[in-house]
Amino acid sequence: MSLCSACMALFLMPPVLSLRVSQPHDLLTLTFYIAVGLVLARTTPSKREQALVEWDQIQRFPLLDTPRTELSRTVAELMSSDLGPELRSLDFAIQGDAFLLPCTPAESRQLLCDILSVALQTPGIQRISIYGTRLPDDHRLLVVAQVVWPRPVRQVIITGMRDRDCHALMLPGWPPRWHANWFDNGYDRIFQISVQAGGSTTRE
């Protein structure tokens, strides 16, 4: 930046071949050029910073080619399975149906079938709601087995809890990158499913 400014003053501004700037408008132009250069230098990331950002993305999302399956597609398939009549007998709802699970279609069916089978065993269940959300390190799926519906108004209702404060849910055949737990808030039994991105474990 300093070298460019000196070259501009030396070769382009009178008196030529001198670092002295005699015209006020040339001095203003040179000052503006330096200011813009400093702003661009501060806002443009260096190659090292760009490399660190790329590495962070690789670490956070290790496999960008991980298969993805729409939650709505999996739910539609389950509605035509043996679980369908039970789900249709309840007030069944799905939020975020464009949510993508980092699984193959077969894995998504297994995951959702296992969780819904457990949720349907909740005593006094009246409604099941499914929510999908994306966290920095994984995908979180909430399956809410609602016993009291509609919920009472003007009541504080816990809809999420730290994993260590929940009951662990161990389901057979699940890969290590799938984790599930549950808690009861007095109105709902909430199943929290964490799915980390990774290679597929089930073939179509």
Image: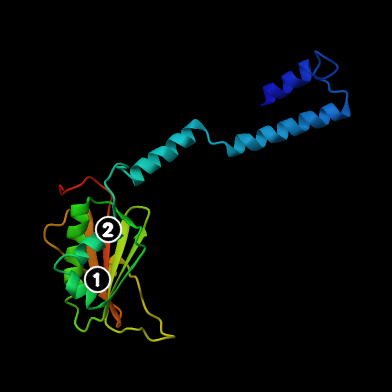
The residue under the point 11% across, 61% down is 172
State the image coordinates of residue 179 (x, y, percent, origin top left).
22, 60
Q: Which quadrant does the N terminus fall into?
A: top right
Q: Residue at x 68, y 21 (%)?
A: 3
Tell me residue 168's x, y (percent): 20, 67
Left or right of 34, for residue 182: left
Q: Nearer the viewer, residue 81 or 44?
A: 81
Give the vertical position of 195 relative to 95 (above or below): above
Q: Position of residue 117 (x, y in %)?
A: 16, 70
Q: Is residue 102 shown above or below 32?
A: below
Label 1's element?
A: strand
- Classify residue 56 by image quadrant: top left
Residue at the far top in the pictured view: 17
The residue positioned farthest toward the left in the image shown: 172
Element type at marker 2?
A: helix
Q: CA distance from mark 1 to mark 2?
A: 24 Å
Picture coordinates of residue 161, whole percent (x, y): 33, 70
Question: Which disc number belongs to residue 182?
Answer: 1
- Residue 73's tag is 2
